[in-house]
């Protein structure tokens, strides 16, 4: 096991707001005596909490080597007999029975980027009892224009241009890749808009996409958009990474727009985003100023000059 796998789990366990929120939502969702499936159990946290909250039986599935640590922790906590650990990807394993509740903290920095939508679609079909429940039950993805992240618009330049070669065109591409940062609220130039709301009880599209509109409320140099998520249980958000999200093990995402644009209060803009699991792409436009930018993560090629590979089929 790579030591970074252990450290990643340590970091998530040290994120107390995350642990408390997941624990409280799990406690509220679980009726004592029920059977629970924890997908991506990691250190075994949610599986062990499910036992503490009265689950009669827990199945804990994990594809990583950290599963052995979870097994050890369950033994150490006297819970080994109540948790059945299963090694493998959830879509490739079998369970001996259907469960009342499926829980998973497979929530990426921008909500959907750890594959929860397709993992839950499979779990609903193969593992959940009729009328069974999912935790989380849904996610909402939000974006707001920002003046933050200016360092990313120019950061590759000095490294390479010192050689005497001009890497300008490459710099332009490399400055249009999504990044992770912890955004400051005072750097947002407008309130956030909801890009996408997903109901995990429904099958999602192969490539989730959406559009947000914003009207600038604060003058500044627009560098891109900051994204965050909310996770829902019982109709209410129980996790929310909107800035300030300092100290969280989840960062915010930053979708840059290339060369920064000076904006004034009242400026209208839109951002369309496609969350292709292989690469994200986004198109920014400010029609009144004639600005249109196409950006993507695919080796940093803007979608406009790169022909994407064929779309996956189910
Ligand atoms: C974000 S961690 C959460 C760990 C733990 N549930 C917690 O809350 O601390 C996600 C874990 O899920 C595992 N994982 C992700 N997708 C999986 C899948 N479909 N099947 C099994 N394990 C998965 C990863 O290897 C990782 O250990």
Image (spheres, helix red, strand yellow):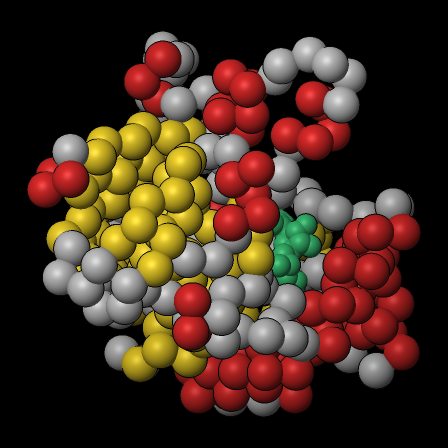
**Measured from the top left, where is residue 219 in percent x and y?**
28, 63
At 22% from the left and 59% from the top, the residue drawn is 264
In terms of depth relative to the viewer, which is nearer, 181 or 168?
168
Asked whether, in this view, residue 17 is left or right of residue 187, the answer is: right
Report how many numbered discs are placed on residues in the image.
Answer: 0
At 70% from the left and 31% from the top, the residue drawn is 158
At 42% from the left and 62% from the top, the residue drawn is 228
**Measured from the top left, where is residue 160 in percent x and y?**
72, 23
Quadrant of the image where one finds ligand 1: bottom right
**Measured from the top left, where is residue 153 in percent x and y?**
52, 40
Q: Tell me if residue 256 comes above or below residue 4 in the rendering.
A: above
Asked whether, in this view, residue 142 is left or right of residue 102, the answer is: left
At 22% from the left and 68% from the top, the residue drawn is 217
In terms of depth relative to the viewer, which is nearer, 61 or 19?
19
Q: Quadrant of the C terminus?
A: top left
Q: Tell me if residue 24 comes above or below residue 249 in the rendering.
A: below
In terms of depth relative to the viewer, which is nearer, 39 or 130?
39
Q: Is residue 115 visible?
A: no
Asked whether, in this view, residue 89 is left or right of residue 32, the answer is: right
Q: Tell me if residue 180 comes above or below residue 163 in the rendering.
A: below
Q: Is residue 294 visible?
A: yes
Asked whether, in this view, residue 49 is left or right of residue 206, the answer is: right
**Measured from the top left, where is residue 186 in percent x and y?**
42, 74
In terms of depth relative to the viewer, which is nearer, 114 or 47?
114
């Amino acid at each position: 096991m790579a030591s970074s796998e252990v450290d990643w789990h340590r970091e998530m366990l040290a994120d107390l707001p995350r642990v408390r929120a997941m624990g409280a939502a799990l406690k509220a969702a679980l009726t004592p005596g029920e059977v629970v499936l924890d997908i991506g159990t990691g250190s075994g946290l949610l599986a062990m909490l499910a036992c503490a909250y009265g689950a009669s039986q827990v199945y804990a599935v994990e594809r990583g080597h950290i599963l052995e640590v979870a097994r050890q922790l369950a033994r150490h906590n006297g819970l080994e007999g109540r948790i059945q650990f299963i090694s493998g990807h959830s879509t490739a394993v079998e369970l001996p029975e259907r469960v009342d509740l499926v829980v998973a903290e497979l929530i990426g920095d921008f909500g959907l980027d750890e594959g929860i939508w397709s993992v839950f679609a499979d779990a609903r079909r193969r593992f959940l009892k009729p009328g069974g429940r999912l935790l989380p039950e849904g996610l909402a993805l939000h974006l707001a224009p920002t003046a933050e992240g200016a360092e990313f618009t120019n950061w590759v330049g000095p490294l390479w241009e010192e050689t005497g070669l001009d890497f300008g065109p490459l710099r332009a591409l490399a400055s249009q890749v999504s990044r992770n940062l912890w955004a400051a609220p005072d750097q947002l130039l407008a309130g956030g808009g909801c890009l996408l709301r997903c109901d995990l009880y429904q099958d999602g599209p192969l490539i989730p996409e959406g559009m947000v509109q914003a009207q600038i409320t604060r003058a500044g140099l627009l560098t891109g958009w900051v994204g965050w998520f909310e996770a829902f249980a019982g109709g209410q958000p129980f996790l929310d990474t909107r800035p300030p999200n300092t100290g969280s093990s989840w960062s915010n995402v930053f979708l840059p727009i290339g060369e920064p644009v000076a904006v004034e209060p009242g400026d209208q803009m839109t951002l369309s985003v496609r969350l292709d699991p292989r690469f994200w792409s986004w198109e920014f436009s400010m029609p009144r100023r004639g600005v249109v930018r196409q950006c993507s993560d695919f080796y940093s090629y803007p979608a406009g000059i790169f022909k994407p590979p064929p779309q996956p089929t189910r």
